[in-house]
Image (spheres, helix red, strand yellow):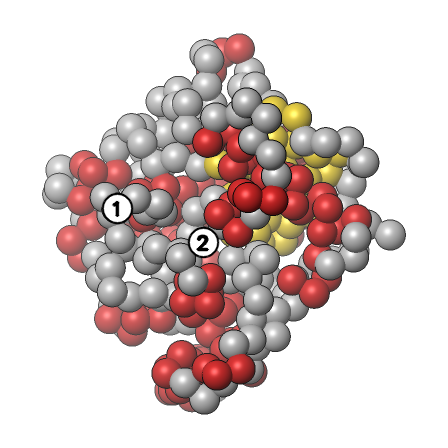
Amino acid sequence: MPSFKRYIGIDYSGAETPTSSLPGLRVYVAEGDAAPVEVPPPPLLRKYWTRRGIAEWLVERLAEEVPTLVGIDHGFSFPLRYFEAYGLAPDWPAFLDDFQRHWPTDEHIYVDFVRDGLAGNGAARVGNPRWRRLTEERAGGAKSVFHFHVPGSVAKSTHAGLPWLRFIRRQLGPRVHVWPFDGWDIPAGGSAIAEVYPSLWRRGFAPEGRTRDQHDAFCIAAWLARADRDGTLAGFLKPDLLPAERTMAQIEGWILGVPGLIRAAREGAASKRSAAFASTHISRTRH
């Protein structure tokens, strides 16, 4: 039996400001056994969605008594190297607060305004494009969340979207489960939000005249619904990770749909890096 009744796919965009109407922001919803359909923004938002509009709409939907799984196409956290570089505790909600203080991209500014020093204090929290999360390494083609201005880049949408994840959490509290930061197990009957990477599934669904952004949002909702209905979603919600890797992933985040285990890498650099972090940072915070 499926765990959810509604599946929302969001193709994200970090362009312009949070109140800009953007053709790159697309929302598709699948309910029951029906195929995903595009959800237009409310009339007051003009032709296309805005980032603020999507966040407020999600708060309304996730407050309803309908078990919903949401997939959003941007990074939900940063690599451990970032936490280490700035002496940040391995605490995701605290990371969101710290990030928003330095990158207030939920205000009426462009991401590039912060990058260029015209707003916020991004220079005090800048990442290196060579830093990659474990889930990005395992996903293969996924770009670093700090890799701006390259094809397939997720950096701008991540830097624009993180403060809105914070907004949603602050509005909904325990009514929404952000996977895997709030735990690998999603409470029965509850709703959840997960990071996704539509490139994993794009070729599995015919475009049928949709634009690239529309198709990505469609693929997210379609894959989430199919995986839940056929019983494979449960396995993807618990990727096969070493204990230290699992601890690391609850700080860095994980892309839903990416397999955890690469056997040749069990004793590789990623595992050693996560084990070192767990022993020197996480254990210290618990004592």
Residue placed at 44% from the left, 37% from the top?
12
Tag 2: amino acid: Phe
Q: Is residue 30 above or below residue 150?
A: above
Tag count in the figure? Answer: 2
Name the element at disc 1: loop
Residue placed at 65% from the left, 62% from the top?
237
| Residue 22 point in image, percent of width and height | 39, 23
> Where residue 150 is drawn, which disc sits there?
1
Which residue is nearer to you in this view: 206 or 274?
206
Looking at the image, can residue 55 be seen? no
Looking at the image, can residue 148 be seen? yes
Q: Is residue 207 above or below residue 193?
A: above
Q: Is residue 248 above or below residue 143?
A: below
**Residue closest to the far left:** 117
Tag 1: amino acid: Val
Sort mark 2 into few (<14), some (14-19) or many (20+) by Cα contacts within 10 Å.
many
N-term mark: 1 or 2: 2
Name the element at disc 2: loop
Gap in angstroms between the C-alphas marked 1 and 2: 19 Å
The residue mark sitting in front, 1 or 2, is: 1
Residue placed at 32% from the left, 46% from the top?
153
> Where residue 76 is drawn, which disc sits there?
2
Which residue is nearer to you in this view: 65 or 202?
202
Q: Tell whether 186 sits left or right of 1.
A: left
Sort mark 1 into few (<14), some (14-19) or many (20+) by Cα contacts within 10 Å.
few
Residue placed at 37% from the left, 83% from the top?
269
| Residue 156 point in image, percent of width and height | 31, 43
Which residue is nearer to you in this view: 36 or 70?
36
